[in-house]
Image (cartoon, rainbow, N blue to C red):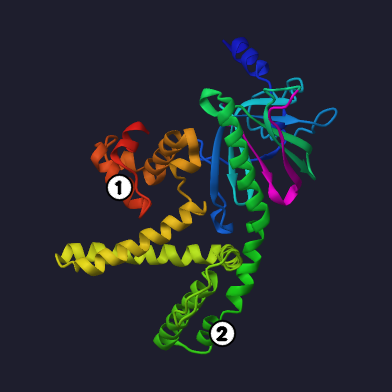
Amino acid sequence: LQSTTMSTSVSKRRRWSPLTCLAPAALSPSGLITLESNDGEVETLVRTNVELRYAGSGSLPLPPSPSASGASNIATQTAPWNAIDTRLSCHVTTHRIVLIDDEGIGGSIPYALVQAVQSTGGPSFRSPRSSYKIELSTHAWGDLTIVFRGGDFSSYTQSSKDRDDSLNAIQSALKRKAWEDKERQAMKEALRPSTAIASRKVGVDAILTKNQMRHRENASLADAAFGGNSTGAVHKKNSGSNVEDINAFMSEATELIKVIEKYAATLERERSASSSRGAIAPSASSKGEQETTKLIGMLENMGMTSALSAKQSGSMYHKQLARQLADFLHQNDKLSKAGGMMTLTDVYCLFNRARGTNMISPEDLLKA
């Protein structure tokens, strides 16, 4: 038995490929990406059945093995170099590109290390079925290529759409440089008038003054981001102003998300309180729900919410939803506290309550 155990540990080799040479990506127990929420990272796109290739000569350096500390008896032998990883899922966020294989190994390419990105491949006279690709030039790993194989059905037409959607998401993220927002937001927070004024007061007066100033600042932020003003002036609807409005919105996106999330949470508390009292104003409730739905829908369309929609997730939507559900039930041992079993009705209600306004349908829950 001892010799069998030793042979099993020795026979396990560590993979050596472009994916295992990238920066390790932390995953949740169900296999979802662990986003850097403190830095405002948001997942914007998911595509399946992609390949990662190293376009340079030789091989990439393999990072130190996590078992090198001696805590594990697994051998650290390395398999031969393989320049291609297949059957990966490609996750595009505001901060990086994350690639995950079927074994739960994840590697990330931070945008800060990307020098250039371009699309290549597609049909030509010599190669009518040439693969659709994205070529990345990086500081750390040289030239990498992401090849799209058309999702779960290996459709050549779908591979073209997957490549274009991914390229647009990557280029938008590179243009925004959201990974630099943390420092910028910290500077803006320190310079807020509400922070300076409240620091000179104490007690209840300081709290009230700070809240009043924050409400004014949030209103000014929305006016600046949407190109509006407090008097409700009508803007000229031309292409130039539209581009300026979008750029202003994107530049203030991180802070706007925080404001809208607070607004949605407040509305949900008020709705719950009204329901418990049995007194709901239909007109006010309807107007509030319409405003919240409009704001959240705008963020979803721009790929700036943490819960991916079916359009952003593509063929992985229900698989991603299943993993979100598994993480939700795993958090705080909800399933164990319920005795190890929960009805689908209870799961549906609890999960949608946690998702706020971005709810799912009963059909989506069953498929997940």
The numbered mark at residue 80 is: none
Q: Residues within 10 Å of mark 1 (few under 14, many from 20)?
A: few
Helix, strand or loop at disc 1? Answer: helix
Q: How many marks on residues?
A: 2
Instruction: Determine whether 262 is above or below 360 in the image.
Output: below
Assess whether residue 102 is covered by the magenta stretch.
no
Residue sitting nearer the eye, 142 or 231:
231
Residue 134, image x, y percentages = 69, 37
Q: Which mark is residue 350?
A: 1
* Pointer 2 residue: 196
Asked whether, in this view, residue 62 is left or right of residue 73, the answer is right
**Which residue extends farthest left?**
278
Q: Quadrant of residue 21?
A: top right
Q: Is residue 107 magenta?
A: yes
User: Which residue type does callout 1 highlight?
Assistant: Leu
Mark 2 or mark 1, which has the lower sequence index? Answer: 2
Residue in the picture at 41% in, 88% down: 205
Residue at disc 2, secondary structure: helix
Q: In the figure, residue 92 lies in which quadrant?
A: top right
The residue at the point 24 percent across, 37 percent down is: 343
Whole-Å distance between the Cαs marked 2 and 1? Answer: 40 Å
Residue at image location 62% in from the left, 46% down from the top: 168
User: At which x and y percent is residue 291?
Assistant: 36, 64
On the image, which quarter does residue 288 sit in?
Answer: bottom left
Q: Which residues are magenta?
A: 103-125
